[in-house]
Image (cartoon, grey):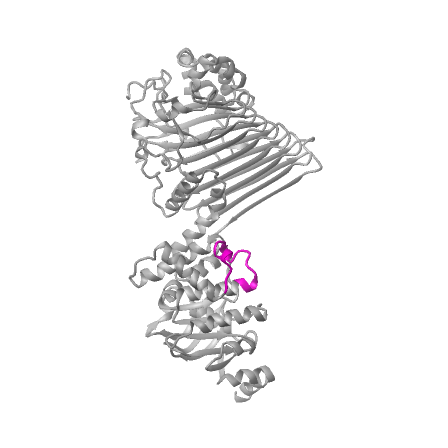
């Protein structure tokens, strides 16, 4: 579904991604790990269409479409979902209004009628249960005054509402205690089907105990330098990243 | 009706001189078609205007209200009170759904005779009507209040109004009477030629009374209008008064409004002025707290685009201890529009334990839009809590991207953000039906659709 080839990207003139390639097929879970500053969040930003990053070389195709040509909203409507590392607070915009607008824009893109208010609220109620989200949160402004854990749950709730084909979870585990982590991971696992895929970006192996990846990639200095199975994550947890850095430098 | 309007004799000459000349030649007619109470202050007001003239940008308080262009237009005045051929009760169907108001009209500068059955059921003792007429029927009542606030002002527009206004809206709520429904006053500008209207409104709430007034400003015809209205409000002890103003006029309109409110002890006032659409707007709002334990909430919002100019000049004077005031103004400005806000807050030496908070937040949607904001705090008491904050910025790009990443189009995301930005002003509307209607109007306005009140034939 997703094919990234030799991707280079800059922010403020500084090259962060330096030739990244990655292929994701339906039903797969890919974990991307790597030291600070390797480019993990940049990859998530570029895939979701953040204008702050400039793609200088390479290609990204999503079900045959040139993803880089699409606006952020069209990428979402095509089925890409980014769970933000730092979800944004939007005072004055209610969760209900925000989600209904988003869901109906997705439906419009697929030439479907907008959902009726009752249908929408029913679906919202179902999806809230998936991440054990408090009813009160749904009536508040988007993320405003939410705790760190509530914000992350809200991201997975939105993911459930929009039913993406590819979800990118950017450090979804950061700032979560163990209970919240379990709830969030459960939510992600319940949403998994043989038709959709996930890219899980994380620092720590911990999350991968709950969301078991098919592939683990190590991102270092803007490139994927090592790929393995789920056991690679355990090895990294055990040995850190220095041995990989060393391997890369020796290869040069 | 062209002939019937008393055009200024000095057609071609504009500005102060032509109006001074007009007054000198026609003051007898002006007085003849008005009432003694109003005439009592008329010559003094004229003398003051002769001295002050129209305010110019050279005055600190009018630095951002430039009336020069508006005053080059040769407006007609209707000093001989020729009836205007319009029946607003027939053409005006914009009753905010569910609001069930007592409905009144001022057409140009004259109170339109009431012929609506809904108004026959006012609670006992309540008087609502033409200032001119009520002053004849209840001269003592009107005399006791009329001009008490306005004649102390050293302001060219107020003085001009004192010289030329012949009528206006009058509302009296006796002691402990609570109006069960809001009162709606619709100011309609209707003329075939460029036209000016001066009116003076007088609102009195006695001790323990409660009333809500919704003022809607509308234009009907596609000519230049200038309206210069003065409203005096007296709020008695423990009385509760809510004043909403919704301005929805065309770009050829200059709308000048002075709202003077006097609060007695333990009274509660909410004023919320909303400019949806207009040419040039100047609101001067002065609220004097003359008793202890007053509560005051003054809000407003402006949506400006094209060449619109809106200046809200506000002043809250704490004369007594233990009062709370809060002020909240929000502007969304696009294109070449200009906004200005002044928040004067005065705390007298003895007004200890004052709590006063002021906020003005603004969003500029284009590089050519301009906003001037000026908090002006003068605090002479030493045991007070006062704060002010002003911001001018753009839409939050991060929030916009967040929404886009959920599939919401950029246009819709901008709209949601602008709407959200104004929502706390709209939340301060305590009439639910009106709040819903204004939400809808604001949304339509932000979408760029001309936000006429739906179903209101009068401004279509």
On the rendered image, what quadrant is the C terminus of chain B found in?
top left
On the rendered image, what quadrant is the N terminus of chain B found in?
top left
Vertically, is B401 above or below B254? below
x then y, percent, for residue A224? 48, 81
**Residue B97 appears in the rendering:** yes
**Residue B68 appears in the rendering:** no
Residue A139 included in the magenta stretch of the image: yes
Q: Nearer the viewer, residue B229 or A117?
A: A117
The mark tally for this picture is 0
**Does residue B42 appear to the left or right of B445 in the view shown?**
right
At 44% from the left and 72% from the top, the residue drawn is A190
x then y, percent, for residue B60? 55, 33
Q: Nearer the viewer, residue A247 or A118?
A: A118
Which residue is most to the right?
B382
Which of the 4 quarters of the picture holds residue B193?
top left
At 37% from the left and 35% from the top, the residue drawn is B249
**Does residue B66 appear to the left or right of B190 in the view shown?**
right
Give, as a single range, the part of the protein colored magenta: A132-150
């Amino acid at each position: 579904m997703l094919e990234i080839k030799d991707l280079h990207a800059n922010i403020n003139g500084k090259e962060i991604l330096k030739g990244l390639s990655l292929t994701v097929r339906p039903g797969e879970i890919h974990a991307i790990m790597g030291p600070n500053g390797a480019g993990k969040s940049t990859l998530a930003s570029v895939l979701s269409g953040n204008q702050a990053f400039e793609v200088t070389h390479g290609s990204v195709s999503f079900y045959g479409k040139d993803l880089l040509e699409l606006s952020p909203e069209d990428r979402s409507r095509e089925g890409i979902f980014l769970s933000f590392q730092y979800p944004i607070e939007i005072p004055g915009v209610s969760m209900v209004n925000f989600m209904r607008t988003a869901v109906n824009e997705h439906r419009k893109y697929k030439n479907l009628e907008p959902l009726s208010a009752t249908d929408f609220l029913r679906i919202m109620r179902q999806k809230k249960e998936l991440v054990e989200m408090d009813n009160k949160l749904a009536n508040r402004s988007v993320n405003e005054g939410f705790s760190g854990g509530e914000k992350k749950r809200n991201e997975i709730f939105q993911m459930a509402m929009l039913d993406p084909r590819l979800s990118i979870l950017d450090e979804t585990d950061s700032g979560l205690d163990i209970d919240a982590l379990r709830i969030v991971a459960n939510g992600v696992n319940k949403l998994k089907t043989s038709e959709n895929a996930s890219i899980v970006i994380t620092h720590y192996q911990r999350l991968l105990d709950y969301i078991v990846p098919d592939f683990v990639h190590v991102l270092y200095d803007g490139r994927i330098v090592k790929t393995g199975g789920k056991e690679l994550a355990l090895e990294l947890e055990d040995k850190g990243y220095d041995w990989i850095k060393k391997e890369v430098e020796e290869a040069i | 009706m062209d002939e019937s309007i008393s055009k200024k004799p000095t057609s071609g000459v504009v500005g102060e001189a032509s109006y001074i000349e007009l007054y000198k030649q026609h003051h007898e007619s002006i007085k003849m078609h008005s009432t003694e109470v109003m005439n009592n202050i008329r010559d003094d007001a004229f003398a003051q205007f002769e001295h002050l003239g129209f305010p110019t940008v050279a005055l600190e308080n009018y630095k951002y209200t430039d009336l020069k262009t508006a005053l080059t237009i040769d407006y007609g005045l209707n000093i001989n009170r020729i009836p205007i051929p319009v029946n607003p009760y027939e053409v005006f169907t914009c009753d905010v759904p569910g609001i069930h108001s007592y409905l009144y009209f001022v057409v140009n500068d004259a109170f339109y005779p009431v012929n609506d059955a809904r108004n026959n059921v006012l609670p006992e003792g309540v008087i609502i009507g033409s200032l001119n007429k009520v002053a004849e029927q209840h001269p003592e009542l009107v005399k006791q209040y009329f001009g008490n606030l306005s004649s102390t002002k050293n302001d060219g527009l107020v003085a001009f109004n004192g010289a030329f206004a012949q009528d206006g809206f009058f509302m009296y709520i006796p002691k402990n009477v609570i109006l069960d429904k809001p009162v709606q006053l619709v100011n309609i500008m209707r003329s075939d030629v460029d036209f000016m209207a001066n009116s003076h409104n007088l609102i009195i709430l006695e001790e323990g009374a409660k009333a809500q007034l919704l003022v809607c400003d509308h234009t009907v015809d596609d000519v230049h209008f200038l309206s210069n209205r003065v409203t005096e409000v007296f709020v008695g002890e423990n009385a509760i008064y809510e004043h909403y103003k919704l301005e929805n006029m065309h770009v050829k309109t200059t709308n000048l409004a002075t709202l003077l409110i006097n609060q007695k002890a333990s009274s509660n006032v909410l004023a919320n002025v909303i400019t949806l659409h207009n040419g040039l707007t100047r609101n001067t709002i002065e609220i004097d707290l003359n008793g202890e334990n007053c509560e005051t909430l003054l809000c407003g919002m402006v949506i400006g685009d094209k060449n619109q100019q809106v200046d809200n000049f506000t002043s809250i004077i704490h004369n007594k201890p233990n009062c709370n005031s809060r002020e909240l103004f929000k502007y969304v400005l696009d294109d070449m529009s200009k906004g200005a806000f002044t928040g004067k807050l005065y705390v007298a030496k003895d007004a200890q334990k004052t709590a006063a908070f002021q906020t003005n937040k603004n969003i500029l949607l284009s590089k050519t839009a301009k906003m001037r904001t000026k908090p002006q705090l003068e605090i002479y008491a030493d045991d007070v809590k006062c704060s002010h904050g002003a911001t001018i910025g753009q839409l939050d790009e991060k929030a916009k991207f967040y929404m886009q990443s959920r599939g919401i189009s950029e246009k819709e995301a901008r709209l949601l953000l602008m709407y959200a930005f104004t929502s706390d002003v709209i939340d301060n509307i305590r009439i639910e039906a009106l709040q819903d209607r204004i939400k809808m109007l604001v949304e339509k306005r932000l979408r760029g659709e001309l936000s006429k009140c739906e179903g209101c034939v009068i401004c279509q």
